[in-house]
Image: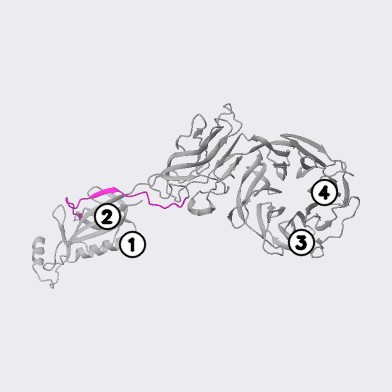
Amino acid sequence: MALSSTIRTLRSRDITDAIPFNVGQPSYVSDIWTNTTVAYDVAIGGLPFFYGISNERPYERQTAPYKKQQFDNSKEPGEQTLEGWWIRSQSSFHRGAGITFFDPSAGEEVEYRFNTSQGVDVWTKGQTTLLKDTVQGLSSANNTIIVGANDGTNDCLVVADGSALKKITMATDTPTVSTYTQTGTASAIQSLATNGSRYFFANGTHIHYGNIGSTTSDIETYNCSVPATIGYVKQRLFAGVANALHELDATKTTGGHTLPTAIFTHSNTSWVWSAISESGSAVYAAGYARNSSAIYKITVKDDATLNTPTVTAELPVGEKVLSLFSYLGFILIGTNKGARIAQQSDTAGNLVYGPLIFETSQGVNGFTAKGTYVWCASASNGNAGLVRIDLSTEISPLRYAYASDLEQSSSTGTTLSVALIGSRLAFTSNASGVWVEKNATYVTSGFLQTGFIRYGTLEPKNFKRVRARGIYTNGGLLISPVGSDGTVYETAIYNSIIGTPEVNIINPPGSQEFIAMKFTLSLYKDPTDLTSTLDTTGPTFKGYQIRALPATPRQHLIQLPLYCYDVETDRYNVQVGYDGRSWERIQALEDLESTGDEVIFQDFTTGEQITVVIDSVGFQRATPPSGGFSGFGGNLTVIVREVG
């Protein structure tokens, strides 16, 4: 019997009659379909179908939406959605350095922050300007140490220069250096302190005392056969000599005294006292032995005598305290790893310290402060210089905003100390001596580099435009994108002649996951040409806006009108099918859809074979049950999305 006759006969039978045989392939077990005797048009995940294309049900193909509607909680106006242009802006950098990625969705951890800087003042909200330059106050290759003081007439620096003690005063940017006359045999000065009118220093043989206003008043008050660390705190003079801690009489005016009985002797004979400070109800003394370091507190009894020192904080193994500084209720801890901030946790003077605010291989050897700012004696961009901390801007508990500050680019030595001479900063380098902030002269150039901008997604972007806001009457601004590998691409210049046009970003070439922006402020009109006009003040940089387009590879949505009947005919009039086949295939297709997994789409009419996910499956029943067949067939509308 011919197949067509069999089908006609089956359709006339009662629905309860048995089906004498199956026609076609009853199971779909492979992701790839291979046509054999039947010329199917398409296959989805190994399920073959014929096209059911008509004017009412066309085959459609279109680009899938690729710009995700995103919410951006940036406080910069106009950035709340990422539609069309993807925009990122910053209008201030006063929360300091230290971020790698600038994703405002991370909240205050990155808000108004940047990656790194050099030679710029970021601390005025809404603007960035050049820092002051420095002048050499004393040329020396010794390990110089300074403290700020006043000699009764002028603000000055008292300087330990090797074995000599000197004084520096400044007339505008011109230093005057005088040398104190020492009693006895001079040896290298290890530690220096002042009570305002007097100086105290320790060398390898004695503790010295003298009047800052007189260069001939030096007295060797105490004999001291080994180097010591001294500190004048709570109107008391302390000295850490070897592993012993002593309270000295700061009023002695005669020499040759032996050290008083130690108030505490560390049980470890290798212990070295490195720093002495105060805060609130306690005096603090810190030291270390090999990889162990701790801070001791010393409280005062009602009768003004001292309690036995006890440990109030221990540092992580390998981190050694080099300096302590008390300011505004905080204790700043300088270590060989960086700087930490501590606060008293109770009235007994116990300390709780926070994480490293910044890290440096040079360590932090001293502090000074003014207003809400603390300056740390540490490397700045590899040069002798300072790092500034803003105690009014807390990033997270006991972690505050910081940035590189004053530095001397011609000196790569270790920064040993920092002090104020009046309102001006000064610091020392073991390679070049003493450097003082100039009165009104700015560094020639400085830069600020943002965190990497990635719009909170790892998808590639085409970074296209950038505009820098600011005042460019004086000097110039160089705009430079920075690639993910750190390569800097000089792109455009702003100044009073060129103005502030929106700039095309050409490099780095191609789409990028992220880039940063480097803005170089300069006294030169053209920061890349040192023969261009040199102004006395530089530009005021107020922020930037960068625009990008998503570079996600485009995907396509394909709408497939398909037949799904029990019995169907291919383009060569070959019939295939059996009772219940349409329902079986619908269930199999919906099972593929429900997993949300990738499947293979094959179009045998074009030869296309791609990976897709099934976005939707629609079915319209077109035939009623009839005879021995279910008659469940109809038309499928399947939408698949190209992936990969």
Q: Which residues are magenta?
A: 50-74
2 and 1 marks in contact (CB < 8 Å): no
Mark 2, residue position: 639
- Which amino acid, mark 4? Phe
Dot 4 alpha-carbon crowd within 10 angstroms: few under 14, some 14 to 19, many 20 or more = many
Q: Give the spatial CA distance, label 2 vs label 1.
A: 15 Å
2 and 4 marks in contact (CB < 8 Å): no
Residue 19 disc label: none
Q: Secondary structure at mark 2?
A: strand
Residue 200 disc label: 4
Q: Is residue 353 visible?
A: yes
Q: Give the spatial CA distance, label 4 vs label 1.
A: 79 Å
Q: Give the spatial CA distance, label 3 vs label 4.
A: 21 Å
In this rendering, the count of numbered labels is 4
Q: Position of residue 113 (x, y in %)?
A: 55, 48
Residue 17 within the magenta-colored segment of the rendering:
no
Q: Position of residue 368 (x, y in %)?
A: 70, 48
19 and 480: which one is in front?
Answer: 480
Dot 3 alpha-carbon crowd within 10 angstroms: few under 14, some 14 to 19, many 20 or more = many
> How is the protein colored in the picture?
one colour
Mark 1 or 3, closer to the camera:
3
Q: Give the spatial CA distance, label 2 vs label 3.
A: 77 Å
Name which of mark 2 and mark 4 comes first in the sequence: 4
Q: Quadrant of the N terminus?
A: bottom left
In this rendering, would 257 be left or right of 335? right
Mark 1, residue position: 595
Mark 2 or 3, closer to the camera:
3
Q: Give the spatial CA distance, label 2 vs label 4.
A: 85 Å
Q: Position of residue 335 (x, y in %)?
A: 69, 52
Mark 3, residue position: 298
619 and 566: which one is in front?
Answer: 619
609 and 414: which one is in front?
Answer: 414
